[in-house]
Image (spheres, rainbow, N blue to C red):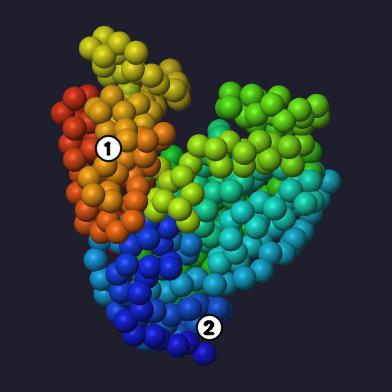
Amino acid sequence: MLHLLPDVSLLPYNTFGIDVPAEFFAAIHSLADIEELSAQKSSIKILGGGSNILLTGPVRGVVAHNMLQGIDTVREDETHVWVEAQAGVVWHDLVLYAIAKGLGGVENLALIPGTVGAAPIQNIGAYGVEVCEVIEQVSFWHLQDKALVHCSNQSCAFGYRDSVFKNGMKGAAFVTSVLIRLNKQPHFNTSYGAIEAELTRIGVQQLSVQAIAQAVMNIRRSKLPDPRVTGNAGSFFKNPTISAALYDELAAQHPGIPCFRLSDTHVKVPAAWLIEHCGWKGYRRGDAGVHSLQALVIVNYGTATGSELWQLSNEVVQSVLSKYGLLLEREVQVW
Ligand SMILES: Cc1cc2nc3c(=O)[nH]c(=O)nc-3n(C[C@H](O)[C@H](O)[C@H](O)COP(=O)(O)OP(=O)(O)OC[C@H]3O[C@@H](n4cnc5c(N)ncnc54)[C@H](O)[C@@H]3O)c2cc1C
C-alpha cells in the first residue's frame, strides 16, 4: 500500500547533506507501489542513495525512495553466473555477494555509494571498469507508458558516465532490477597503477576478486572524502573527451597537460588537473568548497545550500572554459 507523506526533509537522503523539503515523499517497496504511484502522480523524482544528486531547492511533486530489495542467482553455465538484483539493493552489497561467491566482474567497482537501480543511469565506473561491461539487462517501469520494459545492454546506449536513461529516457524509466553476468574465471583488471601498488603494499601474492576489491576499498577510503563527515557526491564533473588534434594544440599552449588515450583519434583530459590548474583545489567560500586532495570533488563543509554549491560549480566551469577552452560537463544530477 503506497503512502504519500507531505513536506518531508531530504536531509537524510542526500550525501551532500542539503536540507530541502520534498512536496511528497513515498517509500517504494514493490512494483505495485510504482504502478499505483504512476497512476496517481505525473511529477515523480526517483531517489536511490542520493549520492549523485545536488538539491538546489524544494522538490515539487513526489520523491519516490526506491527500496526494492533482493539478490538472486538466476542461471549459470560453465563459465558465467547471471545475478539479478532489485534496484533498491545497495550497490556495494551486490559487489560483496559476487566476492563471497568468488565471481569476477564487479570487484573494481567496490564501495561505490548508491543503489543498484542508479548504477546503469550514469554507467558507474572506477579503476578501469564500467558497470556496462557486466550488465545484461535493465528492467524498468515506463512511467508514461505504464508498462514494465526489459532493456538489453545494447538498447541502454551506455557511454562514459552516460546511458539512454540520462538522455532519451530521462525521467521516464523507474529502474526496478538489473541483471548482471559474472565470471567464474575472472579476468583481473589491475591496469590502474594504484591497484598494483596497493596489492603489493598489502602483500597479495595471488590475485583474487577479494584481493582486488580490498585494494580498491583501501584506495577509495584513503582518497575520497567520507560523505558522513564532509558532504559530497564524488566526482562532480566528467573528464572531457576531446580529439587528439585539439589535445596537441592544448599541449603546445599548456605544457604538462595530461591525457588518457582512448583511441588514435580521441583522448580524455583529467578534469581534476584542469580545475587544480585554475587554482580551485582547496578553495573554500563559506561552507562550499573544492576538496583539498581531489579537485573533482565539490564539498559541503556544513551548511552550504545547493544553490551555493551550484554557483561554485558554475565558476569552476567558467574558469576552465576561459583558460583551456574546454566545457566541463557535470556528472552530478541537479534537481
Ligand atoms: C564518495 C562518493 C564516491 C563516488 N564514487 C563514484 C565512482 O567511483 N564512480 C561512479 O560512477 N560514481 C561514483 N559516485 C557517484 C554515485 O555513487 C553513483 O552515481 C551512484 O550510482 C548513485 O547512486 P544513488 O542510488 O545514490 O543515486 P541517486 O543519487 O539517488 O540518483 C542519481 C540519479 O539516478 C536516478 N535514479 C536513481 N535510482 C533510480 C532508479 N531506480 N530508476 C531510475 N532512475 C534512478 C535519480 O533520479 C538521479 O537522477 C560517488 C559518489 C560519492 C558520494
Q: Amino acid at mark 1?
A: Tyr
Q: Residue furthest bottom?
A: 1
The alpha-carbon separation of the residues under discs 1 and 2 comes to: 47 Å
207 sits to left or right of 165: right
According to the picture, the residue beneath numbered tag 2 turns out to be: 32
Q: Position of residue 333 (x, y in %)?
A: 34, 55
Whether pointer 1 and pointer 2 mark residues with C-beta atoms closer than 8 Å, the reply is no
According to the picture, the residue beneath numbered tag 1 turns out to be: 283
Q: Position of residue 309 (x, y in %)?
A: 26, 51
Q: Residues within 10 Å of mark 1 (few under 14, many from 20)?
A: some
Q: Tell me what residue is drawn at x 19 percent, y 32 percent.
A: 319
Quadrant of the image occupied by residue 97: bottom right
Residue 142 appears in the rendering: no
Front-most of 130 and 290? 290
Q: Quadrant of the C terminus?
A: bottom left
Q: Tell me what residue is drawn at x 25 percent, y 71 percent.
A: 58
Q: Residues within 10 Å of mark 2 (few under 14, many from 20)?
A: few
